[in-house]
Amino acid sequence: MVAYTTALSTRLTGPARVRSRMVAEIHDGLLDTTDAYVLDGLPRAEAARLAVRDFGAVAELARECQRELTVAQTRHTARAAALCVPFLLVCWALARSAVGPVAAPLALLAVVSTLLAAVTLAATGGVLARRFPSPPALPRVVAWAGTGAGVGMALATAGLACTAFVTDPWPLPALAGALSAASHAVLSTSVRACRRCLAPEAALSQGGPRSLAG
């Protein structure tokens, strides 16, 4: 059973806490199934083998688990965007006076990203998620939208840093640039994790090597 859960864990990518809880629940399920077979009179080694057989091949179980982990990471990324992206509006407001209409895409990007984050949070949790399944393309859309927002934050950081040198007073754009840089770091970390979840999910959905079926 340890080999089974270890093999499963190595195939999964996603939030560490969710992944650990998921693997622990599966391990507990294996123990419960094994105990049930032992109560039926089977030797423990045979009972453990049958329990693993009942749970199925690692590749099949990993496919189901990875879907759940991808949704969990997508929700984390959407939450990060909902918290961080509004700083783009602050950056837009500060940059508008310095660079004029060129700063307008920052506002548009912030609004679109925030709306997408809100929709994602609604689609992956709460009443809406219980009534309707999450769209399969949602994690990929969130990952690339988050990437775009991250790039926007990086550009805003660079622009505000340059603006701070030529505007008076300079502390406000400098502070906004620092906030934008911090937000970019938080969001980009979550976006990279979201993209990493998509790779194993695609590989598992196409069918990988089967192992440890019993």
Image (cartoon, rainbow, N blue to C red):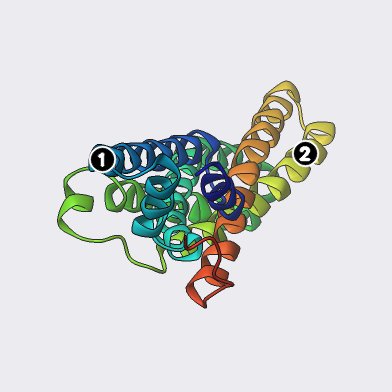
Instruction: Name the residue nearer the viewer: 24 or 71.
Output: 24
Q: Total marks drawn?
A: 2
Tag nearer the camera, 2 or 1 = 1
State how far apart marks 2 and 1 are (Cα): 69 Å
Residue 158, percent across and down?
78, 44
Dot 2: element = helix
**Residue that mark 1 sits on:** 36
Callout 1 amino acid = Ala
Residue 63, percent across and down?
45, 63
The crowd level at tag 2 (other Cα within 10 Å; few <14, some 14-19, many 20+) is many
- Is 29 placed left or right of 180 in the picture? left
Residue drawn at point x = 52 percent, y = 41 percent: 15
Instruction: Name the residue nearer the viewer: 182 or 212.
Output: 212
- Residue 206 against residue 185 in the figure, above or below: below
Looking at the image, is mark 2 or mark 1 earlier in the sequence? 1
Residue 33, percent across and down?
30, 43
- Is 4 placed left or right of 22 in the picture? right
Callout 2 amino acid = Thr
- Residue 164 against residue 115 in the figure, above or below: above
**Residue that mark 2 sits on:** 163
Residue drawn at point x = 42 percent, y = 46 percent: 48
